[in-house]
Each structure stands twice: as structure tokens, then as C-alpha cells.
């Protein structure tokens, strides 16, 4: 099993309210040359949590941090016109993300929770995940 030291939160950088799926993201990532979806978990608008890449396999979601991290992505993250970053999480997504991150921290107690923006010049995940989840 991989040694997990980080849990990195992402958004799909898609328009607010548009219901994209693991299959959609898998296609986008494969078109960029990935072997499969880069994230380990994806949280849909309704708060359901879907498996992406198996946790046993290193992700493809944060350059330089994939070997020892788990990538968690929520659908959304941009304004409806897809021109600007926006925290578009539905109440269901907020709850599901919190519960998933809490569960992952129980499995990997030494892992830190960060947002993709903590490692790259991006708005992703369109909110400060490090601050929001500091108490988990």
C-alpha cells in the first residue's frame, strides 16, 4: 500500500449546476494522455461519492504530489458561464466532502488536507480547503 501523506481537494472546473460524471472526467483525462481518471474520488452535485482511480494506484491530479496523496474532486468550481472560479458546492457536496475527508483522515491520520491551489497557481478548488478542513 502507498504511504499517504496528503489528501488534496480539487474542483472539476466546470460550470455551476452542470452534472458531470466520473466517466466525463475519465474521458477528459485520457484525452490528455492519462491512463485513467486522475482523481481517486469524485463528489457529484447531489452529494454522492463515486470511486475514480483505485486508491492503491498513485493519482494524476497534482504534479509532484501524486505518489503519496489521494485526490478528491467535487463537480463544479466555476460560474455558470464558466469564466470565473466560484465555490459552487451544493449543501449536499459540502456535507459529503466533509464526511469523506473525515473518513480518509481516520484511515490516514498523519495525512494533511490541502487544496490543489496550495501547490499550483490555480483557483482550484475555488475555496480555501486548507482552512476549511483544518480541524479534521
Image (cartoon, rainbow, N blue to C red):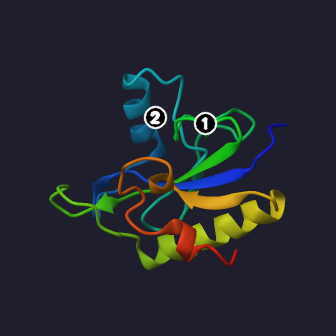
* Residue 47 is at least partly visible in this image: no
Query: In the image, 117: left or right of 55?
Result: left
Quarter of the rendering containing residue 66:
top right
Q: Position of residue 19 (x, y in %)?
A: 35, 56
Q: Residue at x 60, y 73 (%)?
A: 133
In-front residue for pair 89/123: 123
Q: Residue at x 43, y 25 (%)?
A: 30
Disc 1 element: loop
Residue at numbered disc 1: 59
Query: In the image, 124: left or right of 118?
Result: left
* Quadrant position of the C terminus in the picture: bottom right
Q: Position of residue 2 (x, y in %)?
A: 80, 37
Residue at numbered disc 2: 26
Q: Can you say whether 114 is above or below 65 in the image?
A: below
Q: Position of residue 113 (x, y in %)?
A: 64, 61
Q: Can you say whether 129 is above or below 23 in the image?
A: below
Quarter of the rendering containing residue 40:
top right
Amino acid at each position: 500500500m502507498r504511504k499517504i501523506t496528503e489528501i488534496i481537494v480539487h474542483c472539476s472546473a466546470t460550470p455551476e449546476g452542470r452534472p458531470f460524471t466520473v466517466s466525463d472526467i475519465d474521458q477528459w483525462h485520457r484525452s490528455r494522455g492519462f491512463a485513467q481518471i486522475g482523481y481517486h474520488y469524485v463528489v457529484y452535485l447531489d452529494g454522492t461519492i463515486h470511486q475514480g482511480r483505485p486508491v492503491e494506484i498513485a493519482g494524476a491530479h497534482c504534479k509532484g504530489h501524486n505518489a503519496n496523496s489521494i485526490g478528491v474532486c467535487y463537480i463544479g468550481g466555476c460560474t455558470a458561464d464558466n469564466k470565473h472560479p466560484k465555490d459552487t458546492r451544493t449543501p449536499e457536496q459540502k456535507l459529503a466532502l466533509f464526511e469523506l475527508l473525515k473518513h480518509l483522515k481516520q484511515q490516514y491520520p498523519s495525512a494533511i488536507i490541502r487544496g490543489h491551489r496550495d501547490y499550483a497557481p490555480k483557483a482550484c478548488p475555488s475555496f480555501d480547503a486548507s482552512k476549511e478542513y483544518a480541524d479534521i
